[in-house]
Image: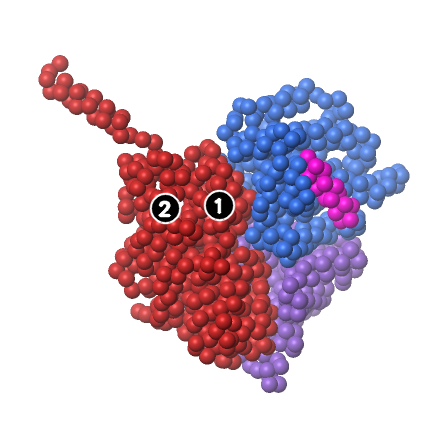
Amino acid sequence: MNRMALSLSLAAKLRWWEFALWACLLCLPFLLPSHALLISEITVIALFAMSLDLILGYSGIVSLGHAAFFGMGAYSAALFAKHINPDPLLGLAIATAVTALLGAFCSLGILRGSDLTRLMVTLGVALILQELANKLDFITGGADGLQGVVMGPVLGYFEFDLMGQTAAWYTLGITLGVFVLLRQVVVSPFGFSLQAIRDNALRAQAIGIPVHARLISVYTLAAALAGMAGGLQAQTTGFASLDVFGFDRSADVLLMLVIGGTGWLWGGIVGAVVFKSLHSVISAWTPQYWTFWLGLFLVLLMLVGRERLIRPWTWGRRA
Amino acid sequence: MLTLLFDGVAYGMLLFILAIGLSVTLGLMNFINLAHGAFAMAGGYTTVLLMQHAGLPFLLCVPLAFVFTALLGALMEATLYRRMYNKPHLDQVLFSIGLTFMAVAAVDYFVGSTQQLVQLPEFLKGRTELWDGALGMGHYRLAIIAVCAVLTVVLQLLLVRTRFGSQLRASVDNQRVAAGLGIDVNKVFLLTFAVGSGLAGLGGALGAEVLGLDPIFPLKFMIYFLIVVAVGGTSGLTGPLLAALLLGIADVAGKYYVPKLGAFIVYSLMILILLWRPQGLFSRGGK
Amino acid sequence: MNTRFISRLMAMALLCCVSGVWAQEAFKIGLILPMTGPSASTGKQIEAAARLYMAQNGSTVAGRKIELVIKDDGGVPDATKRIAQELVVNDKVGVLSGFGLTPLALATAPIATQSKTPMVVMSAATSSITEASPFIVRTSFTLPQCAVAMGDWAPKNGLKRVVTLVADYGPGIDAERFFKERIQLNSAQVIESLRVPLRNPDFAPFLQKVRDLKPDALFVFVPSGAGAAVMKQFLERGMDKAGIKLIGTGDLTDDDQLNDMGDGALGVVTAHHYSAAHPSALNKKFVEAFKKANNGLRPNFMAVGGYDGMRVIYEALKNTKGGQGGGEAMLAAMKGQIFESPRGQIYIDAQTRDVVQNIYLRKVEKKDGQLYNVEFDVIKDMKDPGKAK
């Protein structure tokens, strides 16, 4: 079943198994209260990965600097909560809006050039933002990180507790909302035009799709959602530091998306769960050298072909 | 100011030697190899370990680093990289990131994460001052410039005057036609990758003193190599050479005159250049 | 059933009853260290020291078994915070410890306050850390302690015009500020203050700038591990020959790296709270035991912070009879402890919960063919100047 068939099969109507999966996810904070922190962390990263799927899986833009938007969202939300208003939802909205503006601006940079150019430009943007955050330490706290962010209660009622329950529900709720939205977007004419651009930009242009306009809009949307994820992270942990812009973060989310599978929205969620679970398990066993096993896993995965991971029935066959 | 220029040129030449392998690999095999830094690190550690444990002199270890890394590159090309040529760029990027992570963790495990210090031979340690201190030239950096200049000339001669060179240039221009003309493209790939990796290893060995050497070396400097390749283009040697020199001088001068902005300048410059000419400053167009 | 069997059975039953009375849960110590990433050497030293302390003093205190839960945060503050939260909520640790860098400690402070868990900072060195939470106790040091010591020594030894070069983060800024204030008090001046980025520092252009300024001395603070790079560049630019004296805090001549720096490091004067060459019997024993357990690795000031941190925890456990009274009682038992550490005598100030210790002035010299920081002067019982304001 190739990629096109898979995306077509993800038709406008939500399938039963999607409802079932989401029901399970929403129950998790109930079933595993001691892991509430981990759940909210995975959810935030899953949202981040979904936003990357929009540009990578659906539009074919290879980005090594998506963390730029994650970081922008994180710092915006944290600064807003600290200096203006500690309400989480308001802060989240502001963070998303600010990052959308940044995304619109940066989208001008990825329009031209080859894959390598895009890689460099996206990487460069993330690095510049990291440097900026470092230099403007009177605003951002520099290398020490932004301290003293205290969040108000969600919807005026649910305080962020030490156990992480509120955080888990909050992040899951927001991510579900985004997922439903994106689900509609990717099966709309807009979504299919993106896939056409991904597969052959020249041909897409020839049949009248405004390639540049589409790329700008999808990049802005993806940036806004990544900013939302960053904002959620800052709000649930009460902290923002320079690593939100780091290359590690961009690389990790790329990995997760690839593990889960690009181009079918669930990839971000599946990838985030698998990656974080792998991380927890392997780190408990060898905290210092888990990147080695991660690297090995990646190498093998790429050699074998990444679509195969989520299709166990292909494991026996040769490519 | 002249000293700054000197330092910048030394840094740039070193970057050139480190990055040229990446540039040729990209141009030839259209393969984005982010693990290039790992080969450089391998060269650096080979030198350091040989010096520390086998007691070999520095001047012997550097060529050995080249040989060892070239062999390593040839091995990896034949076994692993070859299978990745026809895969999409994303897969190649992730594959090479995976290799880098493995290399970084392996080195950390076997050698430890502290900065490795190279003990240079005495004659390389001095410094010459000209014109009453206006130009201060560290002997080591002078040596780096000399070695890299010689290598550049040798590479250029290889590319232009030898049969292998023309086979390489043909394969870069159009692989299919070159194969059709009877050029053994696989062999060209293998040798080129090996030499490119070897040069990276050599650069790593030379650079251990100047750039520092620790397990996260590939991650720290990858961005610089990529800048050289993206800005300099992938056809020929002059593009990357000029890009590397530009990068080296801009970096050193930026940190001296405007230390508050530092690396900021380099990244912004790169983005601006790429926006203006997406295929690189000096390339002839195409990928 | 014969009598012997019955008596054995009764003995066992009695034993079970008795141990049932005494047996308590294990006391868990959460140790969060950067085991990977640029500060990995810090994590390694502290872990080794903590384990050494446990090996030397047993793993049972006041009837409770001690369990050391070591986690890697990679030097990323987000991870530290999350790990701390998990340790407190899931593993129910009695004490949080470690914290290789300032941002890591600052990020965790709210967790300590919220959960009323004592937090023993074994490594981070910015003055304001102990003020971030009433549950923080520090066993490492603060930069102002060393910077002030240097600020006194330098002008007395003919160094009147100094350039400062520090890493651009909390401890570095502390060092810069306190050195400058002190040296100005002693009628000398800082002619220029340079800050190097914390990540990927390239010292060459900065040192070139220093050379062009022609000061009497260069005062340096860089985090543990980066000292070698500075030293190399300093020597390569011929700055020692140009008459510029290299001074700084002890992180520059970290015992971890000092021996590999080569003879060019000889004569460098630094101010710090610990040297592996400290001539006390306790230190000799400590260094030998450490080297033996770790393949000849020399302990540095990070290790001593970890070693003493464990001591503080153990003593507090003994005084609270196994942690009765929860976090607040442990904290009270940690404050005011006075004891001899491998570095000399130290005490934990009851008001500020910060460490009060001797600051030594040392010079790099060769002893038994190896480079060591040899102490030649001492300022006794120095409190953190950052709090005295």
Task: Tell me the SS state at disc 1.
Answer: loop
Task: Tell me the SS state at disc 2.
Answer: helix
Is C355 on the left-hand or right-hand side of A204?
A: left
Check residue A101 for magenta coloring: yes
For mark 1, what is the residue?
C133
* C113 relative to A177, above or below: below
User: In the image, residue B42 lies at what x, y percent?
Assistant: 52, 57
User: In the image, residue B166 lies at what x, y percent?
Assistant: 71, 62
Name the chief secondary structure element in magenta: helix
Instruction: Please name the residue shown 71% across and 31% down the image.
Output: A178
Look at chain B in the picture and name its colour. purple
Considering depth in this image, is C383 or B100 the residue closer to the camera?
C383
Instruction: Please name the residue shown 32% across and 39% down the image.
Output: C320
* Residue B278 appears in the figure: yes
Considering depth in this image, is B116 or C98 the residue closer to the camera?
C98
* Residue A287 appears in the figure: no
Label 2 crowd bin: few (<14), some (14–19), many (20+), radius 10 Å: many
For mark 2, what is the residue?
C334
- Chain letter, colour red in render: C
* C317 relative to C300, above or below: above
Residue extent of the magenta highlight: A89-106
Place residue C14 in its image quadrant: top left
Q: Which residue extends farthest left?
A: C3
